[in-house]
Amino acid sequence: MTAKWGEITVNEVVSAIGGRQISGSPDKFIRGLSTDSRRMIPGDMFLALKGEIYDGHNFLAEAINAGAAGVIIESNNNRRKELSINNPAVITVSSTLKALGDLALWWRKQWGGRVIAITGSNGKSTTKEMTASILSLKANTMKSPGNFNNLIGLPLTILLLEEDHRMAVLEMGMNRAGEIARLTRIAEPDIGMITNVARAHLEGLGDLNGVIKAKGELLREMSQESTAILNGDNELYARLASIFQGQIITFGLGKMNQVRAGDIKEIGYCTQAFNIYIKGERVPVKIKLPGIHNIFNALGSAAIAFCSSISSEFIAQGLEDFRPLKGRFQIIDLKGGIQIIDDTYNSNPSSLMAALQTIKALKKQDLVVGLGEMMELGKEASKYHFDAGQLVAGAGARYLVVLGEHGRQIIEGACKGGMDIKKAYLAANHAEMIDAIKAQVREGDIVFLKGSRKVALDKVVEVIKGYFGVKSA
């Protein structure tokens, strides 16, 4: 690996991003890259990104005063007078967002390890974490932190790769056409996985065909020498498989899959034991997660590990060691025998259905549900929220609290599904939702909370946890 922070020069950055240097020394060494002037470390190169709320060009002076070795700016900005301080290296480009991706691609080409890219409508974060849990037992593995899965987060993750990293597990998200294609060109994955395709981000993609096309961009942009891993049980598998001409490995429950699960058993309240069959080999595994959807996540991770020459012993150990992420069907024991299921990280119709089906199978107590609306569903949003209400009623919820613009449609659907209108409440804000839940929860109840990230139901989770108290281990 020839790219190493502290040893690359301004001139190398200019060459990597196709920029134009207008001041400063081309031989100056760069300590790192920063997109936030508040977190600048002297010697960093500051990249001025333009976002929906903030424009990094408005913070050039702060970055330079913090010791930036140089700045990357867009050629049409009008704040160049601030760049005379301390004579930093100044590089201009047509788009700083594109420059970030180009720099990450250059960095990835210098690095000699293996890149795994994971996308899909549901399960990609859990599959990413499960995969990293397995691979890290064999090799030093980098994984996308948090939700660093977009045109900013993924390149920044790649730029953290160091020589001793041998594997990189990258999550790819999107909400409009073309994003996965660009992310794939930046990451150049050796292995690419699509966990599944379902109705999500419809506002930017139009319909399910748009989702298929957008997720399929991974397969269109991958090298034919790489390996694609697909959910063989997904009804849209054939359409996805037709896109890719290279090697395809499938996972699922069906016997036609190269990586499949069988002999599934529940152990206790939320642990599942099953066998993974990989090309004739039987691998007994346990995961501390409920729900059939998490078995699919485990199978996808096992398929990636298999393609990475990881032994069955490491696959079993990595899956057993895995623990659920915050906000992704995280079961928390509260005092009084109450359990809160925190699934607030995000929501779409298929993930909500999977969660409620899992709760219905697990439920031994009364169920109180708090739902936030599901974003980016386009013209069919009202229908999907009505259907969500019916799912809540079908799961046997005793009480329902909803928050958001489509809350009325959720309640209408719940009533259509048989729920008493007096057992459903439309909250105007977080405080009202919290008060309604606190008033309804009784000893031994399950409280399930889920909504799109923008609804921020994680705030409700934290207050409810504090009110009832988390049970000590």
Image (spheres, rainbow, N blue to C red):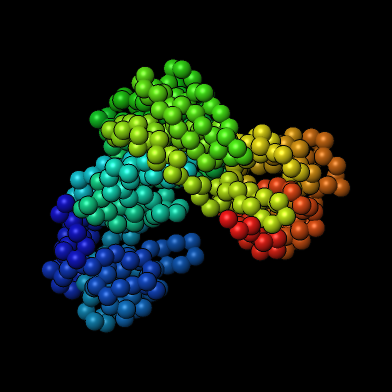
Q: Quadrant of the C terminus?
A: bottom right
Residue 25, image x, y percentages: 15, 72
Q: Residue furthest top?
A: 256
Q: Residue at x 74, y 48 (%)?
A: 445
Q: Residue at x 38, y 68 (%)?
A: 36
Residue 383, image x, y percentages: 70, 38
Residue 266, image x, y percentages: 58, 32
Q: Residue furthest left?
A: 27
Q: Is residue 184 above or below residue 45?
A: above
Query: How many numbered marks appear?
Result: 0
Q: Residue at x 36, y 65 (%)?
A: 35
Residue sitting nearer the eye, 150 or 368? 368
Q: Is residue 217 visible?
A: no
Q: Quadrant of residue 139?
A: top left
Q: Is residue 3 visible?
A: yes
Q: Residue furthest front?
A: 473
Q: Is residue 378 above or below residue 16?
A: above
Q: Residue at x 40, y 28 (%)?
A: 283
Residue 183, image x, y percentages: 36, 45
Residue sitting nearer the eye, 400 or 216? 400
